[in-house]
Image (cartoon, rainbow, N blue to C red):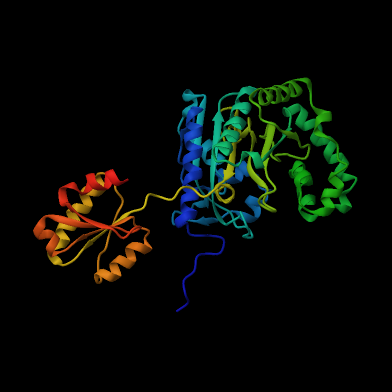
Amino acid sequence: MAKLQPVRGTHDLLGEDARRHRHVIETALATASRYGFSEIQTPIFEFTEVFARTLGETSDVVSKEMYSFTDRGDESITLRPEGTAGVARAFISGGLTQDLPLKLFYQGPMFRYERPQKGRQRQFHQIGVELIGVPTPQADIEVITVGADILDALGIFDGIVLELNTLGDTKSRHAYRDALVEYLMGHKDGLSEDSLRRLEANPLRILDSKDEGDRKIVADAPSFGDYLNAASEDFYGSVKQGLDAVGIPYRQNDRLVRGLDYYCHTAYEFVTDRLGAQGTVMAGGRYDGLIETMGGPSTPGVGWAAGIERIAMMIEAPVAPARPLSLIPVGEDATIAAIKLAHDLRKAGHSVEMGYSGNLGKRMKRANKLGASHAVIIGETELEKGVATIRDLDTGSQVEVALDKIGDHLGAEA
């Protein structure tokens, strides 16, 4: 029988990896809560149309990367490849228009069939925020600021740069799209197969193509800034003014785009050179047309998502949990007393590991392997005297302490 292995592109979280993962989530949630964001958990799978509508049929995610299947009810189901679509669906199906503005934080696993590499897995995890119902630049500023504060609270903001761009309003976007298509049609012979496919359906996506031939063509493409109307320039100016006010530096990136029509105005990414090819740490933008595209009321929104695995690789190792006590009963009569003592100590706040079996020497070796601070030994002699022998595993010294005073004794030592 073949040896069972994790599926390619998935990984187990244990020990320090699990602590890093949890630290990212807890730090992000604590920071976002100070901004008034509350947690939302959406299902791991949705009807396929939730993602097909929002991500676009021509996107790589929909055409190549989604984990979709037909369930027993003959429904097409997809494991979520990202978080925003599920939040938008929850807003619509939950009838949450009366609760606007909504400030939501999410975290959890996402799924995409990609080539696994450092910082990119087929099951990966994200944190994200969505601010729904605010059409003004203040929302963009707040969402970017909470992202920066989370990265700062995690101790990695100094190694990260905020890249910023504007996609303008609908009129500006359409004017730029027409100019871009006209330019690209003149270089059609040099475009990659993917870009040729996008030329009609989603031309803005060509701007962030990774193909070297596409990049050379795009380098001389028209600039978005030349097609912004006054309203779009004012919006973008307010966003930059707000970021200046809170002291968040940024750099302009004219090639930073979001390809679908429901995106508008601000697009941004926090990037780093500390992760090799996978340089994006956190990315987002304004999506005023998304909820309407999904069949809901016209509702503005802005948000971002960040990969937990990528952030976890950048942070310092979180503090390990407190060293446990190793409770070692010797003999059957001591077992019940040890079980009660372990329960009392745990309720008092101590971490306790039970030495279940083996001779005293083996159980002491296990206590040292666990990194225990003390071994608490109860044998027949100790039971008769109503005490336990407490051995300091760092110094080797030991004392006898009454069973009902052990918590006080260990608390005093700590």
Q: Where 408 sits versus 232, above or below?
A: below
Residue 194, given in percent of the width and then of the height, sits at 76, 53
Nearest the camera: 245 or 32? 245
The C terminus, quarter of image: top left
Q: Quadrant of the N terminus?
A: bottom left
Quarter of the rendering containing residue 249: top right
Which residue is more in the foreground, 42 or 406? 406
Q: Position of residue 118 (x, y in %)?
A: 62, 57
Viewer-proximal residue among 329 and 381: 381
Who is closer to the viewer here, 287 or 275? 275
User: Residue 267: x, y in percent?
Assistant: 69, 35
Any part of residue 296 in sight = no
Image point 48% across, 59% down: which residue? 12
Pick out the residue farthest to the bottom: 1
Q: Is residue 272 left or right of residue 49?
A: right
Q: Is residue 322 left or right of residue 276?
A: left
- Using the rendered view, name the quadrant where residue 332 is placed: bottom left
Query: Furthest-right residue in view?
Result: 186
**Residue 75 visible, this angle:** yes
Q: Residue at x 44, y 54 (%)?
A: 73
- Which residue shows up at 48% across the image and 45% down it? 23
- Residue 120 image point, x, y percent: 61, 55
